[in-house]
Amino acid sequence: MTQDLPVRKEVPTELTWDLTRIYKDDATWEADFKSVTAAIAELPKLAGKLGEGADALLNVLQTTLDAQRRLEKLYVYASMRSDQDTADGHYQAMYARISKLATTYEENTAFVQPELLAVPADTLTAWLSASTKLAEYKRTIAVMTRDRGHVLDAKSEALVSAAGDALGASADTFGVLNNSDIDFGMVQDDEGNWIKLSHGIYSQLIDSTNRDVRKNAFETLYQSYDGLRHTFAATLAGNTKAQNFNARAHKYPSARAAAMAHNEIPEQVFDTLIERVNANLPLLHRYVALRKKVLGLKELHSYDLYTPITGEATLTYTIDEAKAEGEKALAVLGEDYGTHVKHILNDRLIDFIENKNKRSGAYSGGSYDTEPYILHNWHDSLDALYTLVHETGHSVHSWYTRHNNPYQTGEYPIFTAEIASTTNEALLTDYLLKTQDDPKTRAFILNYYLDGFKGTMFRQTQFAEFEHWIHQEDQAGQPLTADFLSDKYAAINAKYYGPALEKDPEISLEWARIPHFYYNYYVYQYATGFAAANALSSHIATGDTEARDKYLGFLKSGGSTDPITTMKRAGVDMTDGQYLDDAFAVFEERLNELEKLLDQIK
């Protein structure tokens, strides 16, 4: 028996997202594309006028941001259509066109920041005081002028913007290669059926309690990456060079400094994360050793790191069951929050089913003028429930942000994005531990939590450490060859997981399949967000209405202030490593509990 993924048209309509809420059809999109293209073409006429006074500055900001707002809606529709079937040439072409238009927008507005920086700070202050309408853009102006030493003249900024497509080519190539062109072949599932291996199927099989199944999936997947390792090394090297070039062009000492300055995050936050996680690696080593002991293995391999050590999954969920549990788990956030959760889960804002050539993974997407959509690749599992709750956290955050802020501050910073989603995960864990009394079920939940902690606090920090290393090596002139990357990745992996884990040669190629290495210092925020979420959720879960209201205030704050200030108002100081230590304390506490439960179950 052979089972293959459905093609897009075979997926039930009710389990797909309804993108006609954005544009009723492609013809409507085309008409708006034509209109926005014309508007963007007019933007260079504003050059040279920004410094004429408060009204002139206001006109430039309003006109350019209006074009950007319309562009984003076009982009979201095209990108999501493309993601639902990455082999659909029509939508691939549409996505390429809107990407090109986005580059043109960047070129045509490259004059704005240099001209704004040419206006003396005291003059800007006077204009803001004199114009109520301009004062609405105070935060926008503050963001655009914070890096006075790193913005080039208008001609140079336009040139760098024009190179956007070329500089992003390596990341685009990786996306197509990793989602469409790579062929993982066929593997057998737990029932012995031959099925087509995909990213989503792999995630399911690597959790299998059948060791032969997960071993075969692991080796089959990495055999495909091994055959293309030099190509993947070239795409990763090209992307790293592009990020280092952009940093150098804008007079930053490193790509990390540029990325974190852009997000208003002190580099100290990154360094503190690496330092605190490395200091707590003995906890991970202890958990890995426990896994080896409980599974009764003479050798623990990389494909043994995800299967539940408590045996068969005692908690699995259909889509409808997951919706119901998600609503219950998040009820502690209040009635208003729950209303938005119900709408997102039940009104075709989620694309649930994995179909052939669909983008892997999951995300919450949308723009200021659309509803928040979710891409999922569903399998009946506890992990899928967690993913659903996680992405719903992003979507509700987006709704609150966009409905409580004008467009110019209607997007939350990247740094705080993962906090909202991971708080939902933490609340789900708390809900499950409060509602499940059976020792085996409870042990399963604790194991799942510890695995999630391992996959977020430890694994994402491992990725961040490797990402920073490749940027440093490229900056030093070191060629990023496949062997060079693999040797280092294997060494970091061994350091993180400790002596209980065998050094499988396949895992040295894991760098080849991680899309976050193309996101320019994004991945560390999963770890910082996870720790902050634990701090926030620990108070909300007790029914503390003050903590809940402060949290909802955080969700509504959007981009109205810098992320460090936003989090301090929510109750967490991200510049102090204490929140990380608190997270490790919870990990240790729950590891202790799991060890006791496993002894009882015996």
Image (cartoon, rainbow, N blue to C red):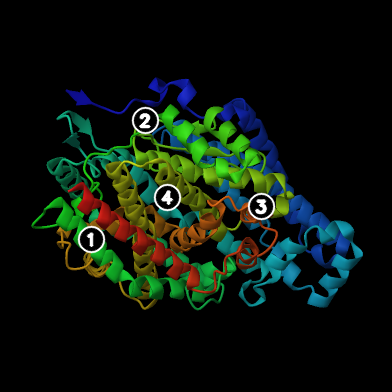
Above or below, 17 against 44 in this view is above
Front: mark 3 or 1: 3
Tell me how far mark 4 sits from mark 2, CA to CA: 21 Å
- Residue 3, given in percent of the width and then of the height, sits at 23, 26
Residue type, label 4: Asp
29 relative to 487 in the view: left or right:
right
Residue 288 is labelled as 1
Q: CA distance from mark 3 to mark 1?
A: 38 Å
Sequence-first disc among 1 and 2:
1
For numbered disc 3, what is the local secondary structure?
Answer: helix
| Circle 3 residue | 549
Q: Is residue 141 visible?
A: yes
Identify the residue under disc 2.
355
Closest to the observer: 550 or 63?
550
Q: Left or right: 51 with respect to 228?
A: right
Is residue 428 rendered to the left or right of residue 490? right
Query: In terms of depth relative to the viewer, which is nearer, 354 or 110?
Result: 354
**Circle 4 residue:** 172
The answer to whether marks 4 and 2 mark residues whose Cβ atoms lie closer than 8 Å is: no
Give the class, few, some or many, for how many residues have Cα within 10 Å of label 4's Cα (few <14, many ≥20): some
- The mark found on residue 571 in the picture is none
CA distance for labels 4 and 3: 41 Å
Q: In the rendered structure, which disc, 4 or 1, sits on the residue that comes first in sequence?
A: 4
Q: Residues within 10 Å of mark 3 (few under 14, many from 20)?
A: some
**Mark earlier in primary sequence (3, 1):** 1
Q: Which of labels 4 and 2 is toward the front?
A: 2
Determine whether 240 is above or below 61 in the image: below
Amino acid carrying mark 3 in the image: Asp
Q: Amino acid at mark 2?
A: Asn
Q: Quadrant of residue 560?
A: bottom right
Q: Residue at x 33, y 45 (%)?
A: 442
